[in-house]
Amino acid sequence: VYMRHAQETLSIHELADGALVQHVPLPDVGTISALRGRTQHTEFFYSFTGFVHPAVQFRFDMETMTSTRLREDRVADHDPESFETKQVFYTSKDGTK
C-alpha cells in the first residue's frame, strides 16, 4: 500500500528485487485497510472504503492476479455508482500543487 497524490494505491511487487508486477485496481478514491495474508499462500485479503463506497472486502488471487468481492456493506437507498469522486490539483501562489 502506497500513498500517491494523497490517495492510497495497492501494488504487487517482486519479493526478490521489488520490481512492480501490477497495480491492483480499486473501485474509487479511498482507503485500504485490513490487508492480510500469508507468504506461503497464493492469496491475500484487503478492505476498501471510499468517500461514497461503504466498506468492501476483497480476495486477491496471486495466480490469476484478480480481485474478487467477498462482502460489501450496504446502505439503504444509496448507489455509489450515482456519484463521481475526482481529485483536483491547483497551483498555489508559490508554484506548488
Image: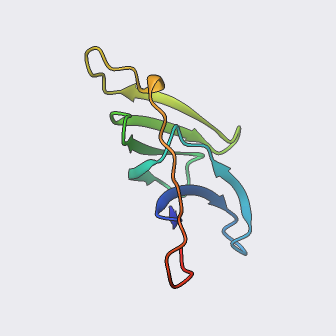
Q: Quadrant of residue 91?
A: bottom right
Q: Relative to 27, does residue 95 appear above or below in the rendering?
A: below
What residue is drawn where x is 47% and y is 36%?
A: 58
Q: Relative to 95, does residue 53 appear above or below in the rendering?
A: above
What residue is drawn where x is 32% and y is 20%?
A: 78
Q: How many marks?
A: 0
Q: Relative to 5, does residue 96 appear above or below in the rendering?
A: below
What residue is drawn where x is 38% and y is 27%?
A: 71
Residue 88 relative to residue 13: left or right: left
For this rendering, which residue is in front, 32 or 86?
A: 86
Q: Residue furthest top?
A: 77
Query: Residue 81: image x %, image y %?
Result: 48, 24
Q: Residue furthest bottom?
A: 94
Query: Residue 97: image x %, image y %?
Result: 53, 73
Q: Relative to 22, does residue 49 appear above or below in the rendering?
A: above
What residue is drawn where x is 29% and y is 14%?
A: 77
Query: Residue 32: image x %, image y %?
Result: 42, 51
Residue 81 relative to residue 65: left or right: left
Q: Residue furthest front?
A: 93
* Color style of the picture: rainbow
Query: Residue 38: image x %, image y %?
Result: 48, 54
For this rendering, which residue is in front, 93 or 43?
A: 93
